[in-house]
C-alpha cells in the first residue's frame, strides 16, 4: 500500500511539474494589456493576412492571405497574394493571383528584387501537400507563375527566404508528422524542427530548434535569423559561403515570435503571440480571441512596442513599419491592421 501511495504521489508531482512548466514556458500567466499610444488608421478587410513583406525602395507590400478559419471549419477558399501601394494612402490592396489556376493556400513568403521592376516571390503553399511556389512579378501588376518546388524534406514548411535568385532557406515548424509527436513538440517543447537549404539540392543546415517559424536574412546578408516561438527566442546563424548555417547565439525575446521583417535600417520587427496556449485555443476555434504583440529588435535590444488582449487584433503574426505607420497582420483575423503612433 505504501509503495502504491508513493508511486501515486510521484505521478501527481510529475503531472503538476509538467503543467507548471507548460503554463510558464508558454506565457500563460502573463497579463497582456492594451497599448493606448497607437490609433487605428485603417482596417483592411482580408481574412488571414498571415505574412507580408515590404519593399522599402519601391514603396509596396506583398501580402500572403489564406482563410485558415474557413478551412478549419470545412469551408475552404482559394488563398491569394496581394499588392499594396504604400505611398498611395488608399489602403486598397490589389489581388495579384485573381486569374491564376494554381490551388493556393499560401503561408510564409519571400520577396527578392532581381532588377528594375522585376521581382521574385517565393511562397509556402499547403494546398497540394506541402510545396514552395515561385512567381515572377513585373512592375506592380503582372504576376507570372514560374515553378513549384516539392521535396520530402518539406515536412511542415512555415516560412521561406531567398538567399539569391537560385537558392533559398525554409523552416519546418515540426519535426514529426504523427499526432502524438507533434503534441510532444508543442507541449514539451521538443527541439526537433529545422531549416532546409535549397541550391539545386535540398539539405538540412540547422536543427535542434523548438518550432522553427519565421526566417529572414540580416541586412548585410551575413546571418540567417530564425524565430523559435516555443522557446520565446530568436536564433542567429552565420551564413557560410556554401549556404551552410553556423549557430551564433540565441536571444531571449520573452514572447512567441512568428514572422520576422526588416525595416529600411535593418532593425527586426515581429508579430508575436504572448500566450501560446491562448493562441492554440483560438486557432482550433475554442476561443474567439488571442492576445497580440509587436516587438522590435535592434542589435540585442528587445522592445515591446504594441500589445492587445485580442479585443482589437488577435494572433498577430507579422508586423513592420512604413514611414509613420505600423502594419500588423494576423493568422486568422478578418483584417490587416494599420496603426499610427498618437501625436505623430
Image: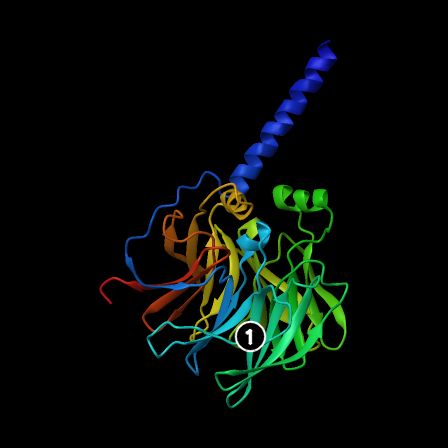
Residue 257 at what x, y percent from top left?
Answer: 51, 56
The image's colour scheme reads rainbow
* Vertical order, 249 against 120 (above or below): above
Q: Residue furthest left?
A: 343
* Vertical order, 44 against 34 (above or below): below
Q: Quadrant of the C terminus?
A: bottom left
Relative side of 56 to 81, left or right: left
Q: SS class of the residue under badge 1?
A: loop
* Vertical order, 314 against 259 (above or below): above
Q: Quadrant of residue 138?
A: bottom right
Work out whether residue 226 or residue 161 is closer to the camera in this orientation and state it: 161
Work out whether residue 282 or residue 54 is closer to the camera in this orientation and state it: 282
Relative side of 250 to 262, left or right: right
Mark 1: few/some/many CA within 10 Å (<14, 14-19, 20+): many
Q: Quadrant of residue 216?
A: bottom right
Dot 1 corresponds to which residue?
97
Work out whether residue 5 or residue 137 is closer to the camera in this orientation and state it: 137
Residue 334 at what x, y percent from top left?
Answer: 44, 57
Residue drawn at (53%, 43%) of the image: 281
Amino acid at each position: 500500500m505504501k509503495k502504491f501511495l508513493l508511486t501515486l504521489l510521484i505521478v501527481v508531482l510529475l503531472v503538476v511539474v509538467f503543467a507548471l512548466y507548460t503554463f510558464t514556458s508558454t506565457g500563460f500567466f502573463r497579463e497582456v494589456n492594451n497599448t493606448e499610444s497607437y490609433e487605428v488608421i485603417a482596417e483592411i478587410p482580408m481574412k488571414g493576412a498571415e505574412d507580408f513583406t515590404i519593399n522599402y525602395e519601391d514603396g509596396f507590400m506583398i501580402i500572403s492571405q489564406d482563410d485558415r478559419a474557413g478551412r478549419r471549419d470545412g469551408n475552404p477558399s482559394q488563398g491569394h497574394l496581394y499588392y499594396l501601394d504604400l505611398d498611395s494612402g488608399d489602403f486598397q490592396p490589389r489581388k495579384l493571383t485573381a486569374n491564376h489556376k494554381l490551388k493556393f493556400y499560401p503561408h510564409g513568403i519571400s520577396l527578392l528584387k532581381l532588377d528594375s521592376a522585376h521581382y521574385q516571390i517565393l511562397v509556402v503553399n499547403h494546398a497540394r501537400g506541402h510545396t514552395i511556389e515561385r512567381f515572377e512579378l513585373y512592375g506592380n501588376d503582372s504576376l507570372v507563375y514560374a515553378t513549384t518546388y516539392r521535396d520530402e524534406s518539406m515536412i511542415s514548411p512555415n516560412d521561406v527566404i531567398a538567399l539569391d535568385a537560385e537558392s533559398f532557406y525554409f523552416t519546418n515548424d515540426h519535426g514529426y508528422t504523427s499526432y502524438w509527436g507533434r503534441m510532444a513538440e508543442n507541449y514539451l517543447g521538443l527541439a526537433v524542427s529545422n531549416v532546409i537549404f535549397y541550391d539545386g539540392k535540398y539539405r538540412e543546415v540547422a536543427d535542434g530548434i523548438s518550432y522553427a517559424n519565421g526566417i529572414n536574412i540580416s541586412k548585410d546578408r551575413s546571418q540567417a535569423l530564425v524565430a523559435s516561438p516555443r522557446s520565446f527566442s530568436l536564433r542567429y546563424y552565420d551564413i557560410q559561403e556554401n549556404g551552410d548555417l553556423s549557430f551564433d547565439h540565441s536571444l531571449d525575446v520573452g514572447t512567441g515570435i512568428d514572422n520576422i521583417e526588416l525595416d529600411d535600417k535593418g532593425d527586426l520587427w515581429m508579430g508575436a503571440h504572448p500566450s501560446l496556449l491562448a493562441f492554440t485555443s483560438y486557432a482550433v476555434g475554442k476561443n474567439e480571441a488571442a492576445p497580440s504583440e509587436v516587438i522590435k529588435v535592434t542589435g540585442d535590444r528587445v522592445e515591446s512596442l504594441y500589445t492587445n488582449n485580442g479585443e482589437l487584433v488577435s494572433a498577430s503574426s507579422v508586423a513592420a513599419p512604413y514611414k509613420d505607420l505600423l502594419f500588423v497582420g494576423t493568422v486568422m483575423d478578418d483584417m490587416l491592421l494599420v496603426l499610427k503612433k498618437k501625436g505623430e
